[in-house]
Amino acid sequence: MTVGDPRGIGPEVAAKALALGPLDADVTVLGSEERSAPHALLPEDAGRVAAQAVERAVELARAGTVDAIVTGPVHKHALHLAGFRYPGLTEMLAHLAGDRDVAMMLAAGRLRVVLVTTHVPLREVPRSVTTEGVVRIGRITDTALRDWWGIPRPRLAVCALNPHAGESGLFGDEDDRVLRPAAETLGAAGPLPADTVFVRALRGEFDAVLTPYHDVGMTAVKVAGFGKGVNVTLGLPFPRTAPDHGTAFDIAGKGVADPSSMRAALDLAVELARSVVRRRSDATS
């Protein structure tokens, strides 16, 4: 586990999460060396501490020393100042793991949402969502659900881009023209309107929902389980989880940060690591 930017709430929620109760795993904590005087750090130094901890965690995971990693919240601007110029940790992890093709999942209980596009302006979403892109994300998701969650036949749904899935072209043709062929290729349901697909997933009808843009997926997860959501990077050679919140500099050092999401990230990392170890054992026996 890396604690993230030492100036934020990462070190606090990491310590609190580990103190919440027994965890069926051995945890190595990285990046906590600056906890004694975090506010004295310059952003560049804080970014370097956070990034180097992530680099070390990936080294341990690729060497097989650890079975999964949990990353605390980082500050993107601080990372950039320190020379780590990635859009976010997801992209950094993909590069460190060997330039892997990855996808971002947000999980809250039984609701699992995977983003087809991530941090792009809303006006660019329609041209950024392609049939090939949805299929690619869907296949990464299918593999992760099989290999990490142990679901033999994952049930995927594709969330529509337009209201009422376009209403037969009345509100846009992207759903019929772009998303429906992708859903058919994947054997997934949809495209299904955003105002119903997440409810159906919460009821257990789908194992994951592929969402065309950032906020429709993030909003669903945070409403379903605010404070307990988990960010999962799919496509890596090892599970990586993270809490669904940021550095929260405004409350850092006040002792009031809620560790629920960090604990959820730890618990899910243990669950996924156990599944990976079991599969590895079965493959060699």
Image: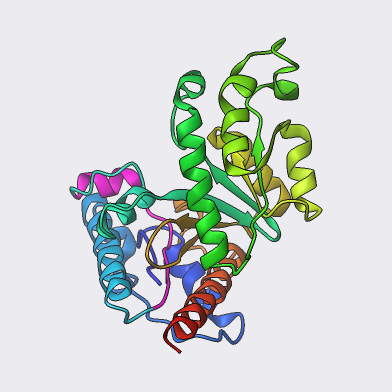
x and y percent of residue 273 in the render? 49, 76
Does residue 33 show up magenta in the picture?
no
Percent position of residue 144, x then y: 51, 60
Quick one: which residue is furthest to the bottom in this view? 285
Query: Count the marks: how many?
Result: 0
Judged left or right of residue 150, residue 99 is left
Q: Is residue 238 above or below residue 127?
A: below
Residue at the extreme left of the image, as rendered: 83
Judge from the rendering whether residue 18 lies leftward or rightward of residue 1; answer left or right.
right
From the image, which quarter does the N terminus lie in?
bottom left
Residue 38 appears in the figure:
yes
Whether 172 is drawn above or below 258: the answer is above
At a point 36% along the width and 52% down the height, the residue shown is: 89
Left or right of residue 98: residue 222: right
- What residue appears at the point 49 percent right and 18 percent down from the top-left corner? 123
Task: Name the residue: 56% across, 46% down.
Answer: 114
Rendering coords of residue 175 (x, y %): 63, 23
Q: Nearer the viewer, residue 168 or 18?
A: 168
Q: Is residue 173 above or below residue 20?
A: above
131 over 100 or under it: above or below: above
The residue stretch that appears in magenta: 67-82
Pick out the residue farthest to the top. 170
State the scheme by which the image is colored. rainbow
- Picture coordinates of residue 231, whole percent (x, y): 52, 55
Q: Residue at x 41, y 63 (%)?
A: 71
**One can see residue 257 in this view:** no
Q: Which of 156/242 is in front?
A: 156
Q: Where, by quadrant of the figure, is residue 37 drawn?
A: bottom left
